[in-house]
Image (spheres, rainbow, N blue to C red):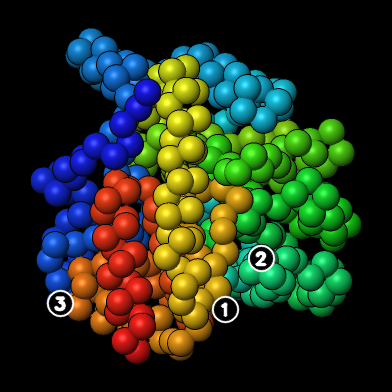
């Protein structure tokens, strides 16, 4: 029904992923034409049933001060019920301005100077920034690899939380960069260890809507009846490619914690904008079929990438969710040099491992959410370049 192989020209829209000035800054003398498979957004046009809703909102011409409509929360509640079978309490939904902004506020409001924050590495690079920005100490807990899949060493985690006096865990679920979904049992063990040691768990779940290959996404919110030492960060931004609108929500069942977060947002004068709030509802009301077909397209593109990569010396982590593939190129040590040399020779732009926190040697991330012909041409160029090393 939807044409995900339509070429969506983003070059004149100042889109970072296709912006020549930004690309040259990141990749130095990158060859044109570009094959940008780095920044985590999609090259797909939203369907008419969503874009028409956006146009209707804008055509009203009213962008003054506003209060968020009740449907902002009710649409999120319905989305969770349909997508995950989860019953979300409306009172637990807190409108927010972007995942990182909110995590930044939470860390500043809930923790104290020099408290320790734990992350599972490798992980999304900005987790380091928001920790250090709040004068907190970052503690790394390396994930273990078994059969091209990450696992948590719970025995070591329990010891580290005790020994280091950890106060907060920043969790990516699905994991970024690998797309690994942490299952309910793993989340339960994290929360049990955290609760025993009075540790807050912040779960970034912005890629959770895009579960692949019949995998089921498990939100930490699923355990709300037994635990309340968590904050879920969710958003339509990745699902519908509307990151520039900075819209999202937190799910917080602990009343005292929710009050602190809301007070922190108010104190900093951080408010969700009207377009973000209303566009979110349009997406959640009208996007079910489009997202279903989007997932099918992502799966086909992952299969396409896998078809090429399995012929070279590399280790591929097929994601449980999302459109990002984490690959260890076994012939290289310096992934930054490799990514720059690849861009210079071929125009293919991959996300370098050093954009993440620790344990990234030889790794690069490939974004498959683009036109299939662009993706296939890029894969041919990657293979030719890699085989020449």
Identified at 48% across, 53% down, the residue is 303
For the question of whether residue 316 can be seen, the reply is yes
**Residue labelled with disc 2:** 149
Mark 3 vs mark 2, foreground winner is 2
Would residue 246 be found to the left or right of residue 210 on screen? left
Identified at 57% across, 23% down, the residue is 79
Task: Residue 36: name its quadrant.
Answer: bottom left
Whole-number angstrom distance, CA of label 3 to CA of label 2: 34 Å
Q: As displayed, is residue 46 above or below residue 58?
A: below
**Residue labelled with disc 3:** 29
Residue 215 image offset from top left, x and y in percent? 66, 43
Q: Depth check: 201 or 114 in front? A: 201
- Of mark 3 and mark 2, the one earlier in the sequence is 3
Task: Residue 73: name its quadrant.
Answer: top right
Crowding near pointer 2: few (<14 within 10 Å), some, many (20+)?
some
Q: Depth check: 165 or 90 in front? A: 90
Whole-number angstrom distance, CA of label 1 to CA of label 3: 27 Å
Q: Quadrant of the N terminus?
A: top left
Mark 1 vs mark 2, foreground winner is 2
**Residue labelled with disc 1:** 359
């Amino acid at each position: 029904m939807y044409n995900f192989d339509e070429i969506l020209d983003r070059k004149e829209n100042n889109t970072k992923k296709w912006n020549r000035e930004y690309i040259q800054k990141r990749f130095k003398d990158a060859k044109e034409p570009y094959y940008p498979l780095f920044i985590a957004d999609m090259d797909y046009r939203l369907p008419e049933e969503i874009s028409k809703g956006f146009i209707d909102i804008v055509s009203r011409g009213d962008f003054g001060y506003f209060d968020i409509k009740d449907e902002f929360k009710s649409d999120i509640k319905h989305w969770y019920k349909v997508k995950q079978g989860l019953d979300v309490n409306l009172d637990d939904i807190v409108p927010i301005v972007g995942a990182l902004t909110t995590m930044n506020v939470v860390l500043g409001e809930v923790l104290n100077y020099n408290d320790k924050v734990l992350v599972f590495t490798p992980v999304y690079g900005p987790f380091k920034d928001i920790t250090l920005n709040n004068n907190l100490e970052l503690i790394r807990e390396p994930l273990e690899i078994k059969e091209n899949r990450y696992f948590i060493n719970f025995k070591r985690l329990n010891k580290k939380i005790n020994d280091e006096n950890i106060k907060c865990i920043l969790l990516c679920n699905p994991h970024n960069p690998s797309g690994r979904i942490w299952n309910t049992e793993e989340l339960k063990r994290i929360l049990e260890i955290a609760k025993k040691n009075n540790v807050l768990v912040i779960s970034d779940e912005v890629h959770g809507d895009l579960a692949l290959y019949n995998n089921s996404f498990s939100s930490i919110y699923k355990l709300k009846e037994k635990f309340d030492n968590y904050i879920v960060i969710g958003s339509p931004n990745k699902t519908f490619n509307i990151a520039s609108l900075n819209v999202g929500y937190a799910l917080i069942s602990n009343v005292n914690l929710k009050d602190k977060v809301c007070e922190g947002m108010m104190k900093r004068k951080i408010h969700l904008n009207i377009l973000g709030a209303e566009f979110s509802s349009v997406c959640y009301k009208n996007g079910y079929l489009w997202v279903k077909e989007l997932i099918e397209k992502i799966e086909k593109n992952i299969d396409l990438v896998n078809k090429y990569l399995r012929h070279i010396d590399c280790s591929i982590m097929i994601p449980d969710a999302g459109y990002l593939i984490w690959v260890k190129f076994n012939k290289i040590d310096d992934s930054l040099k490799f990514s720059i040399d690849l861009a210079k020779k071929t125009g293919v732009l991959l996300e370098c491992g050093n954009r993440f926190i620790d344990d990234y040697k030889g790794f690069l991330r490939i974004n498959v959410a683009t036109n299939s012909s662009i993706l296939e041409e890029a894969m041919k160029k990657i293979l030719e370049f890699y085989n020449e090393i």
